[in-house]
Amino acid sequence: MPPRPTQEERTIACPCGWRAQYRELRSKPVLTVVGQAQVLRPYYLCPHCHQGQFPADQELDIANTEFSPGVRRMQALVGQDASFDHGREQMNVLAGLEVTAKSVERTAEAIGEEIVQRRREEIQQAAQLDPPVVVGQPIPVLYVEMDGTGVPVVKKETLGRQGKTDGQPAHTREVKLGCVFTQTKCDKDGFPIRDPDSTTYTGAIETAEEFGKRMYLEACQRGWSRAANKVVLGDGAEWIWNLADLHFPGAIQIVDLYHARQHLWELARKLYPNDTAKQKVWMDKHQRHLLDQGKSEALVLALRSIDATHPEVIEKIRVEANYFERNAERMRYPRFRRLDLFVGSGVIEAGCKTVIGSRLKQSGMFWTVRGANAIIALRCYHLNRQFEDYWEGRRAA
């Protein structure tokens, strides 16, 4: 049993400005990593506002919860990794702790929301002031990659939003995901190698404007200012390049080569439906000799000279020709290869699957935007090896 407060400790400050007085020791059930426990702590009551206080709850980090910090840490870890029910099972099997799937959900999302708020404050501060220059060794090449992927959400999150099919409502919301990584060398064949454990992720369901500020802060914290070569890599989405121009001026911009090839394949299928042989011949001519060689202007001219009569094909040619014309400078692949740079955005595409898809797009899952963003933030913290930093920060607070 804890000792009762000394005479000097029998009153404490109350938010109303008066002094709360010690009344008694009160018990609270708390689930800890070694099982259920009863915590006795002093109770104080203010005679002016009649507000009660348990200051020990703040010190022990058990305010407004029946779980110890260690148990909440476990719930956050399993909650960001797999379904909440699976997390409940994991805690039972590995630690012998009986919790509900709902408690795993609430705890994981609450901690995720704390991380969301911390990040939001950092972003606001960076927008108002120049972010601090991160001191360290020069970075040969630093990459920023961005992409988007849909996450299934509950109906209230898609009200008034148009789906991909005309006349059909949306069933998903787009998560904008970004990553930052570095490169210092190439392999024996001259292909660039991503530095091990250099990738960090950040993302959320938010507007492109909000996401741009998020990516800018992430890049600055990773050493954007001391990178000798700065690269922004992505697909042809207009919002990506708008953000690149706004937040990363002067960076080398590269459209993912494989995404560009996919645009050609889509056109080939329109030109020669149900004839794979002709599709391959046409692709070989335009891909190998024009696209892969960075001859964007010649490729655009070749596309616009195609003789077509079907309105749908004509429109497809126009759209793709405009796409390659708009991204011409981002498709100088021979130049990028001479600089030993990546020309594919495989890192962020894999990130969309591992960071978002494997956790938030499982069968039967439907999210609120708030819940999804909380789990995304928690998951990014874990994958970025910042999870323990969060708990160290709580202990120091």
Image: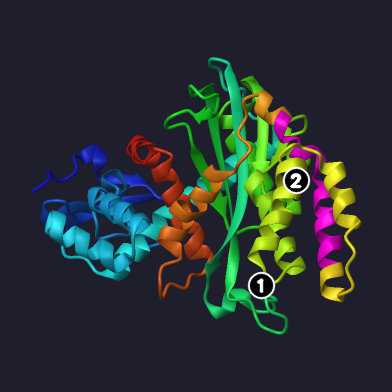
Q: Which residues are magenta?
A: 315-334
Residue type, label 1:
Asn
Residue 4 percent location from the top left of the image:
15, 46
As drawn, which residue projects farthest toward the left?
1
Helix, strand or loop: magenta stretch: helix
Residue 260 lies left or right of residue 311; in this view the side is left
Front residue of this view, candidates 196 and 70: 196
Say which of marks 1 and 2 sits in front.
Answer: 1
Disc 2: which residue: 241
Front residue of this view, candidates 211 and 178: 178
344 is higher (above) or lower (below) than 186: below
As drawn, which residue projects farthest toward the bottom?
167
Residue type, label 2:
Trp
Q: What is the spatial separation of the Cα atoms under label 1 and label 2, in whole angstroms? A: 35 Å
Residue 384 falls in which quadrant of the image? top left
Q: Can residue 17 be seen from the camera position used here?
A: no
Residue 46 lies left or right of residue 35; in this view the side is right
Quick one: label 1, few (<14), some, or many (20+) residues within 10 Å? few
Helix, strand or loop for disc 2: helix
Residue 147 percent location from the top left of the image:
61, 51
Residue 64 percent location from the top left of the image:
33, 59
352 is higher (above) or lower (below) than 347: below
